[in-house]
Image (cartoon, grey):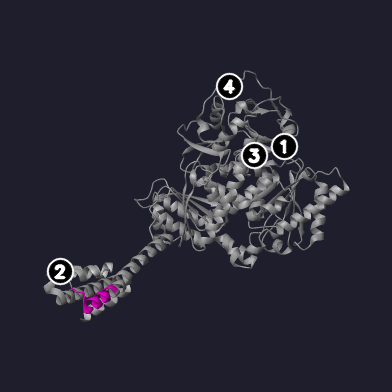
C-alpha cells in the first residue's frame, strides 16, 4: 500500500495530466459497473437478454447518451425506483463522463494549440533561413528576402517581445508592398496601354514569405534543435548590442559596453557551430555573424580557425561598425554612392552576382575582355580567390539568368573615346556633424582614401572639419592623428550660434566642392534616437533659406548633404527637407548580411569594394566604385552611342594598370541610371555635367 501511495504521489507530480485522465476513467468504470449491477438486480427476470454484460450495455447507454426511456421500456417496468435511478445515472454520467471527458479533451486541444504557438513543439522544416537575436537589422533582412523570386522560409528566434516583433515585421512589409507596387503602377502608366497589364503582372511585388517567430534562448541546444537548425540553409546571428541603448540612459555606459565586446554573440555562435557540425546536419550551411567590436571579431575568428580544423561549417563575420564606417567614408567623398550601393546591395533591381570558376589560370583582364565580346546583359567586375583558394567571378546584372546570355555586337563603328590619363581627385571638403560608434571607422576609411590619392608635392586632396560635443571629443574620439583634419569645433547641440556660424562658413567657402555628413548617435536612449540629426537639419535648412534670401541665384544642391538615421520611421520627417541622400545605416548591413547568407562568396567582393588601397599594399591592388565627372574623366565628351559601345570603348582605352568599367551615370538633375538588361538597346548622350559610375583601381 505504501508503494502504491508513493507511485501515485510521484506520478501526480511528474505526469499530472495522465493521473487526471486515469482518475476520470477509473471513476466512470466503477460507476458503470455499479449501475449495471443495480439494473440487473431490479429487473433481471424481465430482461430479454439476462446477464451482467447486457446490464452494462443499458447502464452505458444512460451514462453516455442520457437516454432512459429505451431502457425503461425494454425492461418493461416504469416504476419510480427505476426512473429515479435512471435519472441519477444520467446526471452522474453528464458530470463524471460527458463533462469531464469533454473538458479533458478540450484542454488537450487547447494545450496543443498553445504548444504550437510556443517554443516547446519541434518544428520540422528544412532549407530555411534562421535569424537568431533581434535588432534593427532583422526587419530589413526579412524585407530583402521578400524580393526573392522563390518562396522563402524564415524562422526567427528571439528572447522576448514576440508579438511586438511580429507587428514590426508586418508594418515594414506592408510599407514595402505599398511603395514598390506604387512604383510599378507609375512605371506602367508610361507604357503603351496594351503593355501595362503585362508589366504590372510581371513586376508586382507580393509577400511570399513563410515566417515563423518563436521565443527562446539563442544558445539553447533544445531551442535550436526545435527550429531544425541542422536543416537550415543559412543561419544569421545578429548582435544584441543595439538593444543596450534601449535599456540604459547612460550613453557612456552604452558605448563602453559595445567597445568591450559581446559575449552573447560568441556563446550563440559556439552552440550553433557545434550543432551544425554534426554528421546529420545539412551540407554547405553558412553562418553569418554580425559583430560590433574588435574583441568579438577576434574571438569569432578564433572560433572559425578551430572549426576549420574540424571540417565544420562556413562562418562569415560581418564587422558592422567597420563596414558602415567604410561606407560612410565613401559617401562623404562621393555622396552619389549612396544611391548606387542602395541598389546594388539589394535583391530589388540591378544587383551583384557571383559564380565559381574552374579556370584558375584566367587573369582578371582576360576574364573581362573575353566576357564583353559576346555578353551584353551583364557587366563583368572582378575575379577573386577566397581563403580556401577557390576562384569566383563577379558580375552586375538585373537577373542571374542574364549572366549567361550570349549575343552578337551589331555595331561596326569604332567609337572614339579619349580618357584623361592625368585624372585626379582633388579639393574634397567634408564637414562632419556629431558622432556615433562608427566615427573611428569613418575616419579610417577617409584616411585610406587620402593615402591613396594624396600627392607628395601636390595640393592637398581633402580637408575635414569636425563639429562635436566637448565631452565626446575628450572621451571617445581622437582626431589629432589625421593631418587632413584642419578644424575641430567643440559644441553640443545647444550651442546653436557656434554651430550655425561654422556651417555657414563652410557652405560659403566650399560651394559645389563640399559635403556635409550628419551622424546619428546610436548610444542614446531609444526616445532620443535621431533627435540630434533632426536638430542639425533644422539648422542647415535655416542657413540655406538665408543664403537664398541674400542671393536668389544660390543653388541648394551646391552642397552635398548626407544624413544618417537609425529609425526608419523618421524617414518621412527628413523628406520634408528634400534631402536626397538619406542613409538608413542599418539597412546597408541588413542587405549585405542577406546577400552573404545567400551567396557567401560575395563577402570577398565587399571586402575589396569598400576598402581603398593602403600604404603597404601593392599600388592599385583593389578596385572600388568612383563617381567621376564626365568633363574631367574624358578629354573630349564621346558622341551619342549605346551603353554597349561606351562600356567597351572605356575599358579598351583605359590605361593597362587601371582598367575602368562603366556601370552607369548620373544625369545633371541627379537621376541615376545603372546599365541593366540589353546594353545594345540603351542609348546614351553624355554632357559635361554628367557624372560617371566607374569600377576602377584609381
Report the span colored magenta: 77-90
Q: CA distance from mark 2 to mark 3?
A: 80 Å
Give SS at disc 3: helix
The residue pinned by badge 3 equals 186
The residue pinned by badge 2 equals 53
Label ID, residue 424: 1
Whichever of callouts 4 and 3 sits on the residue coming sooner in the sequence is 3
Front residue of 447 and 22: 22
The residue pinned by badge 4 equals 409
Q: Is residue 474 left or right of residue 286?
A: right
The percent position of residue 186, horizontal first and vertical second, equals: 64, 39
Q: CA distance from mark 4 to mark 1?
A: 33 Å
- Whether pointer 2 and pointer 1 mark residues with C-beta atoms closer than 8 Å, the reply is no
Front residue of 347 and 277: 347
| Res. 138 image quadrant | bottom right
Specify whether residue 385 is painted magenta: no
Q: Nearer the viewer, mark 2 or mark 1?
A: 2
Give SS at disc 4: loop
Label ID, residue 36: none
51 versus 380 height, above or below:
below
Picture residue at 27% right of the left edge, 75% below the top:
87
Amino acid at each position: 500500500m505504501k508503494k502504491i501511495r508513493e507511485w501515485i504521489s510521484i506520478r501526480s507530480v511528474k505526469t499530472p495530466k495522465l493521473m487526471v485522465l486515469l482518475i476520470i476513467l477509473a471513476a466512470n468504470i466503477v460507476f458503470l459497473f455499479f449501475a449495471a449491477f443495480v439494473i440487473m438486480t431490479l429487473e433481471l427476470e424481465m430482461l430479454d437478454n439476462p446477464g451482467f454484460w447486457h446490464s452494462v450495455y443499458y447502464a452505458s447507454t444512460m451514462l453516455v447518451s442520457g437516454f432512459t426511456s429505451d431502457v425503461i421500456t425494454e425492461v418493461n417496468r416504469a416504476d419510480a425506483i427505476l426512473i429515479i435511478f435512471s435519472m441519477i445515472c444520467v446526471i452522474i454520467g453528464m458530470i463524471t463522463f460527458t463533462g469531464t471527458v469533454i473538458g479533458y479533451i478540450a484542454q488537450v486541444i487547447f494545450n496543443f494549440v498553445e504548444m504550437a504557438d510556443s517554443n516547446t513543439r519541434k518544428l520540422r522544416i528544412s532549407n530555411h533561413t534562421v535569424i537568431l537575436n533581434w535588432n534593427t537589422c532583422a526587419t530589413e533582412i526579412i524585407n530583402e528576402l521578400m524580393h526573392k523570386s522563390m518562396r522563402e522560409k524564415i524562422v526567427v528566434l528571439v528572447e522576448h517581445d514576440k508579438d511586438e516583433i511580429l507587428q514590426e515585421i508586418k508594418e515594414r512589409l506592408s510599407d514595402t508592398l505599398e511603395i514598390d507596387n506604387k512604383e510599378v503602377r507609375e512605371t506602367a502608366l508610361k507604357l503603351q496601354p496594351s503593355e501595362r497589364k503585362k508589366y504590372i503582372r510581371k513586376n508586382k511585388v507580393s509577400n511570399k514569405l513563410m515566417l515563423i517567430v518563436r521565443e527562446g534562448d539563442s544558445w539553447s541546444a533544445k531551442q535550436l534543435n526545435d527550429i531544425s537548425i541542422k536543416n537550415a540553409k543559412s543561419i544569421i546571428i545578429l548582435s544584441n548590442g543595439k538593444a543596450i541603448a534601449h535599456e540604459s540612459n547612460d550613453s557612456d555606459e552604452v558605448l563602453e559596453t559595445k567597445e568591450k565586446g559581446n559575449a552573447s554573440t560568441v556563446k550563440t555562435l559556439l552552440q550553433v557551430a557545434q550543432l551544425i557540425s554534426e554528421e546529420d546536419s545539412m551540407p554547405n550551411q553558412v553562418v553569418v555573424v554580425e559583430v560590433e567590436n574588435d574583441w568579438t571579431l577576434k574571438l569569432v575568428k578564433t572560433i572559425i580557425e578551430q572549426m576549420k580544423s574540424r571540417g565544420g561549417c562556413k562562418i562569415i563575420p560581418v564587422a558592422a561598425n567597420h563596414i558602415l564606417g567604410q561606407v560612410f567614408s565613401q559617401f562623404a567623398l562621393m555622396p552619389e554612392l549612396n544611391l548606387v550601393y542602395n541598389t546594388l546591395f539589394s535583391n530589388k533591381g540591378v544587383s551583384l552576382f557571383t559564380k565559381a570558376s574552374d579556370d584558375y589560370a584566367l587573369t582578371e583582364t582576360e576574364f573581362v575582355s573575353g566576357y564583353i565580346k559576346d555578353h551584353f546583359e551583364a557587366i563583368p567586375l572582378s575575379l577573386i580567390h577566397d581563403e580556401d583558394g577557390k576562384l569566383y567571378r563577379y558580375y552586375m546584372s538585373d537577373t542571374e539568368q542574364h549572366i549567361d546570355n550570349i549575343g552578337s555586337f551589331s555595331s561596326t563603328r569604332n567609337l572614339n573615346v579619349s580618357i584623361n590619363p592625368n585624372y585626379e581627385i582633388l579639393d574634397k571638403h567634408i564637414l562632419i556633424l556629431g558622432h556615433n560608434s562608427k566615427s573611428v571607422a569613418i575616419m579610417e576609411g577617409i584616411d585610406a582614401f587620402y593615402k591613396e590619392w594624396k600627392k607628395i608635392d601636390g595640393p592637398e586632396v581633402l580637408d575635414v572639419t569636425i563639429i562635436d560635443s566637448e565631452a565626446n571629443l575628450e572621451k571617445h574620439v581622437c582626431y589629432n592623428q589625421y593631418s587632413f583634419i584642419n578644424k575641430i569645433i567643440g559644441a553640443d547641440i545647444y550651442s546653436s550660434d557656434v554651430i550655425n556660424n561654422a556651417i555657414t562658413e563652410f557652405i560659403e567657402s566650399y560651394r559645389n566642392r563640399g559635403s556635409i555628413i550628419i551622424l546619428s548617435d546610436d548610444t542614446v536612449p531609444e526616445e532620443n534616437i535621431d533627435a540630434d540629426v533632426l536638430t542639425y537639419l533644422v539648422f542647415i535648412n535655416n542657413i540655406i533659406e538665408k543664403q537664398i534670401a541674400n542671393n536668389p541665384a544660390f543653388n541648394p544642391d551646391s552642397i552635398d548633404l548626407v544624413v544618417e538615421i537609425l529609425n526608419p520611421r523618421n524617414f518621412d520627417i527628413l523628406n520634408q527637407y528634400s534631402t536626397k541622400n538619406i542613409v538608413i545605416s542599418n539597412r546597408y548591413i541588413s542587405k549585405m548580411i542577406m546577400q552573404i547568407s545567400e551567396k557567401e562568396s560575395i563577402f570577398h567582393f565587399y571586402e575589396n569594394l569598400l576598402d581603398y588601397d593602403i600604404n603597404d599594399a601593392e599600388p592599385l591592388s583593389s578596385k572600388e566604385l568612383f563617381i567621376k565627372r564626365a568633363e574631367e574623366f574624358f578629354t573630349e565628351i564621346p558622341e551619342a552611342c549605346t551603353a554597349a559601345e561606351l562600356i567597351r570603348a572605356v575599358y579598351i582605352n583605359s590605361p593597362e594598370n587601371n582598367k575602368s568599367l562603366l556601370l552607369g551615370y548620373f544625369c545633371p538633375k541627379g537621376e541615376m541610371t545603372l546599365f541593366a538588361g540589353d546594353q545594345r538597346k540603351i542609348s546614351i548622350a553624355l554632357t559635361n555635367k554628367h557624372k560617371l559610375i566607374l569600377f576602377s583601381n584609381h
